[in-house]
Image (cartoon, grey):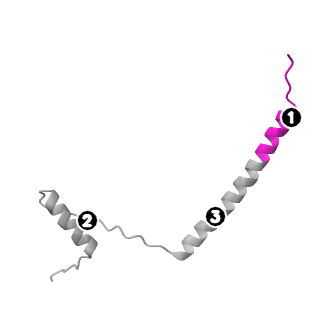
Amino acid sequence: MVFVYVFSLCSLAFFKAAYALYDSEFYVKADDDIYLRPGNLIAFLCSLVFAISVLSKVLDLVRGCYFLHRSFVFTVG
């Protein structure tokens, strides 16, 4: 059984450049495809929106406490 792989133009360009630049016994190109699942993307974006909204509320509370604390601080001099 003979395995034949049809290269994409990007892969061919990679091997051509690698062959021209390096004197090696073999060349390897890893699969760099990105697979996106819409359901996972939606869940991730929703979790980010929730985290940002919670963080915004926490920061508002911290700022309020800081300014409240600072209003009671005075110096004697």
Q: Nearer the viewer, mark 3 or mark 1?
A: 1
Q: Quadrant of the N terminus?
A: bottom left
Residue 7: % across, % down: 24, 76
* Residue that sits furthest to the bottom in the current view: 1
Which residue is denoted by mark 3 in the rendering? 47
Q: Main secondary structure of the magenta part?
A: helix
**In whole angstroms, how far apart are the C-alphas of marks 2 and 1?**
63 Å
Q: Residue at x 82, y 34 (%)?
A: 70
Q: Secondary structure at mark 3?
A: helix
Q: Position of residue 75 (x, y in %)?
A: 85, 22
- Residue drawn at 22 percent across, 64 percent down: 28
**Residue matched to label 1:** 71
Magenta segment = 61-77
The residue singled out by tag 2 in the image is: 29
Alpha carbon distance from label 3 to label 1: 36 Å
Q: Amino acid at mark 1?
A: Ser
Q: Nearer the viewer, residue 43 or 70?
A: 70
Closer to the chain start, of discs 2 and 3, is 2
Residue 74 percent across, percent down from the top left: 86, 26
Q: Amino acid at mark 2?
A: Lys
Which is more N-terminal, label 1 or label 3? 3
In the picture, measured across the screen, residue 77 lies left or right of residue 30, that is right
